[in-house]
Image (tube, grey):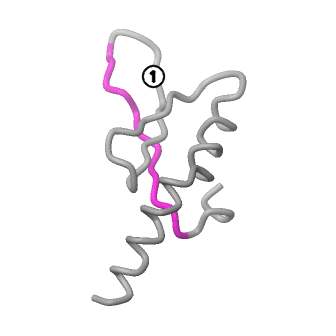
Amino acid sequence: MQAEYRNDKFEVILKSNAAQTPEWRLKCLDCPGKVYITGPGETLNNYELHLKNRLHRQRVNDRMVNSSIA
């Protein structure tokens, strides 16, 4: 997915929950507070839908413009 969305910043994080099975999350670094639970079904498709979202695309474009100015 990172190859397809080269300019988007996201990371895979492990939810700290020692008592149960590990829970992996996808965290969008361009959109504060956006964390997606991984798991069976359409989860990855839901995150890809977020990556295509108009507001997310605008935030990525703004970051890219600001980083090229600096």
Residue 65 percent across, percent down from the top left: 40, 81
Q: Which image quadrant: the C terminus?
A: bottom left
Which residue occupies 34% across, 9% down?
19
Residue 25 percent across, percent down from the top left: 47, 34
* View extreme (top): residue: 19
Asked if 20 appears above or below 60 in the picture, the reply is: above
* View extreme (bottom): residue: 69
Asked if 53 appears above or below 20 in the picture, the reply is: below
Residue 68 percent across, percent down from the top left: 38, 87
Which residue occupies 38% across, 49% down?
31
Residue 49 percent across, percent down from the top left: 64, 43
Which residue occupies 44% across, 49% down?
11
Q: In the drawing, does residue 44 fall left or right of residue 66?
A: right
**Residue 17 figure quarter:** top left
Q: Nearer the viewer, residue 50 or 41?
A: 50
Q: Nearer the viewer, residue 49 or 22?
A: 49
What's the magenta region?
Answer: 7-18
Amino acid identity at mark 1: Pro
Q: Which of 56 and 14 is in front in this view?
A: 56
Badge 1 element: loop
Q: In the drawing, does residue 46 fall left or right of residue 27?
A: right
- Residue on which the image places disc 1: 22
Category of crowding for the residue at label 1, using alpha-carbon neighbours closer than 10 angstroms: few (below 14), some (14–19), many (at least 20): few
Which residue occupies 32% across, 46% down?
32
Q: Which image quadrant: the N terminus?
A: bottom right
